[in-house]
Image: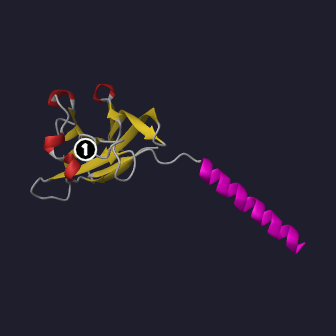
């Protein structure tokens, strides 16, 4: 009986590991802005690489770091009010495809937004991501910004 219990546990553990391996990886990351968010990297023309929301308080900007990193040099920068800053400072976050990697492209024309008082501003952004270094897929990244707390999160 003891052997059957061990075999059953091993089978369950193997099944759980296979399920975890098959689960899709997070398609985006949010980090504090770094040198890739510098205005010198704003993709030209600026008018097509920037959008504002929530009466101009929230700005999305596409930056392109001219091939660094080689596969994924396009970043989505989000700038918004810092609720904890009494002087009215702003918060800057970068959205990329993975830690240290941007996108192969961001479609600013396809950006959509909605607002709900209970949850805040939701922004949906079409992006292109490199997969396994050899193919590019179209995806959508959904962000939620609660201006009351200055919290930017990914929406599954």
- Which image quarter: residue 103? top left
Q: Main secondary structure of the magenta part?
A: helix
Q: Which quarter of the rendering shows the N terminus?
A: bottom right
- Which image quarter: residue 126? top left
- Mark 1 — residue? 78
Closer-to-camera residue (86/9): 9
Residue 83 included in the magenta stretch of the image? no
Residue 3 included in the magenta stretch of the image? yes
* Residue 118 in view here: no
- From the top left corner, tell me how far across and down residue 42 is, in percent: 18, 38
Relative horizontal placement of residue 35, taking residue 145 as reference (left or right): left
- From the top left corner, tell me how far across and down residue 72 is, in percent: 34, 42
As drawn, 104 above or below 9: above
The tally of labels here is 1
Q: What's the residue at 49%, 43% (across, down)?
A: 132
Q: What's the residue at 26%, 52% (across, down)?
A: 150
Residue situated furthest bottom in the rendering: 2
Q: Which residues are magenta?
A: 1-22
* Residue 150 in view here: yes
- From the top left corner, tell me how far across and down residue 71 is, in percent: 36, 41
Relative horizontal placement of residue 53, taking residue 139 as reference (left or right): left
Q: What's the residue at 31%, 54% (across, down)?
A: 31
């Amino acid at each position: 009986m003891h052997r059957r219990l061990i075999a059953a546990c091993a089978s369950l553990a193997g099944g759980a590991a296979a399920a975890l391996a098959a689960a899709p990886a997070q398609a985006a990351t949010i980090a504090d802005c770094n040198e890739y968010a510098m205005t010198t990297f704003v993709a030209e023309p600026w008018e097509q690489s920037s959008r504002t929301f929530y009466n101009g308080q929230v700005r999305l900007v596409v930056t392109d770091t001219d091939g660094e990193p080689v596969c994924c040099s396009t970043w989505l920068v989000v700038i918004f009010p810092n609720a904890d800053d009494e002087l009215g400072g702003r918060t800057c976050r970068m959205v990329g495809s993975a830690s240290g990697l941007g996108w192969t492209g961001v479609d600013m024309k396809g950006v959509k937004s909605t607002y709900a008082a209970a949850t805040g501003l939701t922004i949906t952004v079409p992006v292109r991501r490199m997969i396994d270094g050899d193919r590019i897929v179209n995806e959508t990244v959904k962000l939620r910004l609660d201006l009351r707390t200055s919290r930017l999160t990914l929406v599954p």
